Amino acid sequence: MHILLRGRDIANIKAFDVYEAHDGFTGLKKALAMQPAEVIDIVKASGLRGRGGAGFPTGVKWSFIPQHEPVKFVTVNADESETGTFKDREIMEENPYQLIEGSLICAYAIQAKAVYIYLRGEFWDIGDQLDACIDALREKAYVGSNIMDSGYDCEVYTHLGAGAYICGEESALLNSLEGYLGQPRVRPPFPAQKGGGLYKEATVVNNVETLANVPFIMTEGADAFKAIGTAQSSGNKVYCVSGHVKRPGNYELPMGTSFRELLYEHAGGPLHEDRPFKAMLPSGGSGPIVPLTDEVLDTPMSYEDAESIGTIIGSASIIIMDETVDMTWVASKVTKFFKHESCGKCTPCREGTYWLDKVIDRILDGRGSPDDVKRIADVAENMAGTTLCALGDFAANPIIHTIRHFPEDFAQHVQA
Amino acid sequence: MAIIGNPKYEERVKEHLAKYETTRSAVMPLLYIAQEEYGWVNAEGISEVAQILNLDPTQVKSIAGFYTMYSEKPKGKYWLHVCTDLPCALNGADDFYAWLKEELGVADGETSADGMFTVEHVMCLAACDQAPMLQCNFRYIENLDQDKMRALLAKWRQEAAQSANGTG
């Protein structure tokens, strides 16, 4: 059953009437009849965790907002830019009202003045569609003043980025939205605190998929959501599968489904029958790569189980590589991404990604030495944990973990 | 050409200024308007955006320079942004892009001699299951191959010729 990709089950759910006829805005109505704190308690009890990558418990995040502050904001992170991630795009293209409803429930729970949906600039047409949805909702008094006669007022706006992966990092996103360079902020203060959020006001920043789960939780109850998935990872997750599989695409499955079921039953197995799987990046370019062993394939896809095999679920952008792929080339591709996307604020990331790229190119060209492989591992280890945001760690991961798991792929380029 | 005083943009500028808590927040949408008006983000556009927002032009220019979707130089009529990131590259994007550059006789970032096409490789565009793919003037075009691309190039050339003749 789809909770998120409902566009696949219900024709034209992107139309207001169709969405409303399928339980649309039931969750918002329920929420508006409750105290805001009760809404937060339900989301806490559901066990919903952030789907943008970090997996932080959503209700707990909402509860950090100081209720006594007069001005608060919700910011929706729709900057979907992680290599291999294309789930938020489908949710917003095919089921836009569900995201807006989830955002409004969040806004009511923290008593926000307004919701800003920050879309990557390349999603401008999704922005146009969302603007049309918001206009339709304003006419019906679902957005604006006195929403559904509840006495609660909230505006919803879209904002387009303009091509910068770093703006998916929450503090960079807030800077960008305020008209400054999209670079991370020093924390504390955190976005949830006065002084740390949008326009220095307490702000919740949530991913699209996270908020799109909230209407179901309000309509069906926290227990219904918690009944799906595993003990520490409740609900469904949209897994984006790309690379060497027969049927790449989005698959919405309960958390805890095995990698084997996803890759063989749903994604159709290896693209070429005679080329077995070699490796997987389960969280786009930013998470640790793992060899696709039987142990890994039989691992449940949950936050807790991914850790047991030395990686993360993150945003669940699962990139599959078969035995023909050289992991030095993979390290190079991912490094070029992070070099391009490093915002330049922190020296270890700005300089580290630049030099990693240069040295890996040298190795790939056959001009490298075994010392170069040690050198890039050393550079990567010195980047990890030394930057204001996680991009420095993300950029270190592909180097550290490709060398750890596939040393022979590097050795073949540097032997005399 | 201008943004200020141009009835085409009056309403949109007003809307963008109204939706944020500070005028500075409107710098990104107004830079898009500048790009639409002038075809790229030129000095006039920067100065008009700065004037509307009461910012220094240097501050506006720094924003234009930070983000890849604002072009600080003139480009061809069609901007072809080809994703060559890892998932697309696993499904032929590098070969596709090499072929496209050769077909148009350009290197990465260059504009074809007829001024029609500017090609650039870009990072992940959230279409990894539809590789090879590109955005043309920021519109998605997916599941490409050489035949489809040749047909598209011909179509765009024809469109441009028609609009140049005033018949498009």
Image (spheres, coloured by chain):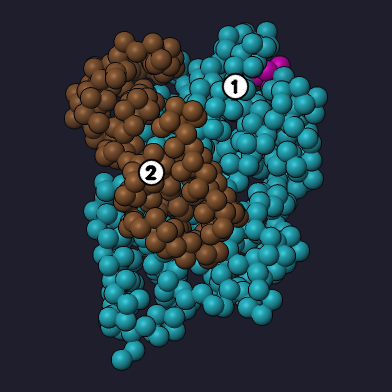
Chain colours: A cyan, B brown
Compared with B101, B58 (above or below) is above
| Picture disc at residue A309 | none
Residue A231 can be seen, yes or no: no
Give me the C-alpha separation between circle 2 and circle 1.
33 Å
Residue depicted at x 29% and y 20%: B1
Q: Quadrant of the N terminus of chain A?
A: top right
Residue depicted at x 57% and y 37%: A208
Q: Is residue A80 left or right of residue A260?
A: left
Q: Which residues are drawn in magenta?
A: A30-35
Picture quadrant of residue B34: top left
Magenta span includes A225: no
| Picture disc at residue A132 | 1
How far across and down, in percent of the image, does residue A173 sit? 41, 36
Crowd rating for badge 2 (residues with CA inside 10 Å; few <14, some 14–19, many 20+): some
The answer for which chain carries disc 2 is B
Q: Which residue lies furthest to the bottom in this view?
A: A416
